Image: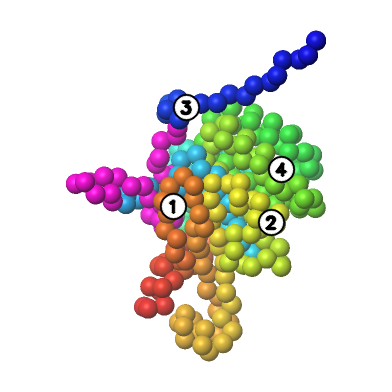
Amino acid sequence: MMNEEKRFSFYELGELAEKAPKLFGIPTGTKLDEMFYKLEEEDGKLVKKPLGGLPYLSIFNISGIPDTGKSLFAEQFAAYQAAKGYKVLFVTVESPANFLYSAIREKCKALGLDFDEAEKNIVVIDASEEEELRENPKALMETMAYAIKEKKITNVIIDSITGLYEHKEMMARQIVRQFFNFLKKWRQTGLFISQKRSAQASESVEAAGGLAVAHIVDGTIVVDKKLIMSQREANLYKKDIGDVIRFIRIDGCRLSGHDTRTWVFEITDAGTVEIIAPLSEYIRR
C-alpha cells in the first residue's frame, strides 16, 4: 500500500491579511529612526512618513570590520528599548556577559536613560562561556525560547551571529536561516551582529559566511571607518591626518522604504553612536 502523497499548504493573498504585521518603528535611540519611512496618501499624493525606528518584527544584520561601532549600536538599542519598558534578550557570543552590565550602565548615563528600568528589562544569555550554546544551535534556541516565553521578550540581539559558525563558515547560511526563522516564529525584532573577514570590502554587505547572511535577513546596516592618510583626504573630510571618519548606510530593507545614502557618524567619548549628516552634506559643509 502506497503512502499518501504529502501536501503543503497554500494561501490566497487575502487570507494573509490578519497575519500581516503592522508597519511601525522600533526606536533605536539614534538618527536611524528617521531614515526608515512608509508612504501615506495626503491630498491625493503619496508622501514619506518617518517610521520612527527599525520596522517592527524586522531582523537586521549589522555588518562591519572591527571597531566600527557594531556592538556599541546594539548596546545602545538595547539600553534605549529596555529603559522605555520593553524586554530585550541579549545573547553574548564574543564577550562575557558581565561586561555588558557596565556597557549598558554607561550608555544609560550618557543618554539620560533610566538604568534601573533598563536593568530589569534586559535578559542575558552568555554563550561566550558556554561551548554547548555556541556549537549547538538547537540548544541555544531552546534556551532563547524559554527566556522569550518566561520574560515576555520583544527584541533579540545576537552579538555576534558570526561566533556561532566561526570555524564552520560552510554552514553559515543554514545557521543564520535557523535563527532568522526562529525569531520570526517568536515574533521578535532582532539584530544580528556580523564580523567581516580581512579579504572582504569594508563598505560591502558581505560578512563572514559570505553574502548568504545578507540575503537571508530583512535588511543590512553597514558600518565602516576610514583612516585619513593623505592631505587630500584631510581637506575633503575636514579632518587631520591620522584621524578616523566613520560611515553608516542602510543597505536594503524588505519591509519599508529607507534612506539609501551614506551617512557620517561619530562614537562619542561616552561610547554612544551619534549620526551626524549624509556624507555629501558633510563634505559640502
Q: Secondary structure at mark 3?
A: loop
Mark 3 and mark 2 lie on one chain; the one further toward the N terminus is 3
Nearest to N terminus: mark 4 or mark 1 = 1
Task: Indicate yes or no whether the magenta region holds residue 210.
Answer: no
Query: 216 or 202: nearer the eye?
Result: 216
For residue 29, the mark is 1
- Taking the image as drawn, is residue 153 in sight? no
Disc 3 target residue: 12
Which residue is found at the position 39% from the left and 41% from the top?
24
For discs 1 and 2, the disc positioned in front in the rendered view: 2
Residue 84 marker: none
User: Which quadrant would residue 62 be assigned to in this image?
Assistant: bottom right
State the separation of the CA atoms marked 4 and 2.
Answer: 12 Å
Label 3 vs label 4: CA separation? 29 Å
- Residue 174 image label: 4
**Three-letter amino acid code at disc 1?**
Gly
Mark in front: 1 vs 3 = 3
Tell me the CA gap for discs 4 and 1.
32 Å
Magenta region includes residue 29: yes
Is residue 108 placed above or below 224 in the rendered structure? above
Q: Amino acid at mark 3?
A: Glu
- Name the residue carrying label 2: 210
In the picture, measured across the screen, residue 263 lies left or right of residue 204, that is left
Mark 2 packing: few (<14 Cα in 10 Å), some, or many (20+)? some
